């Protein structure tokens, strides 16, 4: 069973930047390589939404609202996935979660989340 631990959240002013990290454990580097990884976020009163994802093959996709501002990446050797957040806006305020899946499965493995707050 894979365990995920997010870190790197914090409070920033609009226009600021943060780098989120997610470390996976409980699986080998080989199995990590085979997994799709994603970042979701959830703010109060809203449904959890997919922010960015990177597949096992390295294909990346982003929510329209973060395209050009956020960058997802992964380090298979370290079994980590990252989300670089730039030009942050107040509407980016949320708890950000890391998740993973295999192939056509749904995302069902979650970390505990890390809070990102954007406020002046």
Image (cartoon, rainbow, N blue to C red):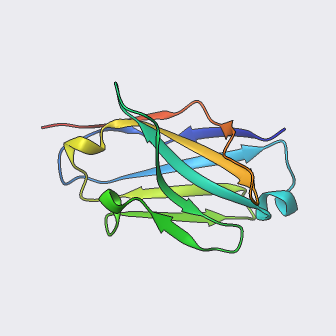
- Total number of numbered discs in the rendering: 0
What percent of the width, then of the height, locates residue 40?
50, 45
Q: Is residue 95 left or right of residue 34?
A: left
The residue that appears at 50% across and 67% down in the rendered structure is 61
The residue that appears at 12% across and 38% down in the rendered structure is 120
The residue that appears at 55% across and 60% down in the rendered structure is 53
Q: From what the image shows, is residue 40 above or below residue 58? A: above
Q: Is residue 50 left or right of residue 29?
A: left
What percent of the width, then of the height, locates residue 19?
43, 53
User: Residue 47 sits in which quadrant?
Assistant: top left
Image quadrant where one finds the N terminus: top right
User: Residue 59 sits in which quadrant?
Assistant: bottom right
User: Residue 25 sits in which quadrant?
Assistant: top right
Q: From what the image shows, is residue 21 above or below residue 45? A: below
What percent of the width, then of the height, locates residue 20?
48, 49
What percent of the width, then of the height, locates residue 3?
74, 37
Which residue is the extreme one toward the top? 45
Which residue is the extreme one toward the left? 120
Q: Is residue 115 left or right of residue 16?
A: right
Q: From what the image shows, is residue 65 above or below residue 6? A: below
Taking depth in this image into account, of 93 and 101 the one nearest to the observer is 101
Q: Is residue 8 left or right of residue 109?
A: left
């Amino acid at each position: 069973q894979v365990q995920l631990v997010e870190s790197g959240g914090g409070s920033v002013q609009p226009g600021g930047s943060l780098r989120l990290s997610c470390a996976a454990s409980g699986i080998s580097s080989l199995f990590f390589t085979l997994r799709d990884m994603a970042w979701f976020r959830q703010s109060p009163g809203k449904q959890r939404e997919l922010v960015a994802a990177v597949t096992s093959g390295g294909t990346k996709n982003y929510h329209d609202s973060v395209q050009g501002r956020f960058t997802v990446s992964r380090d298979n050797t370290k079994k980590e996935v990252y989300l670089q957040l730039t030009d942050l806006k107040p509407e980016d305020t949320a708890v950000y979660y890391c998740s993973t899946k295999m192939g056509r499965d749904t995302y069902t493995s979650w970390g505990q989340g890390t809070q990102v707050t954007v406020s002046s």
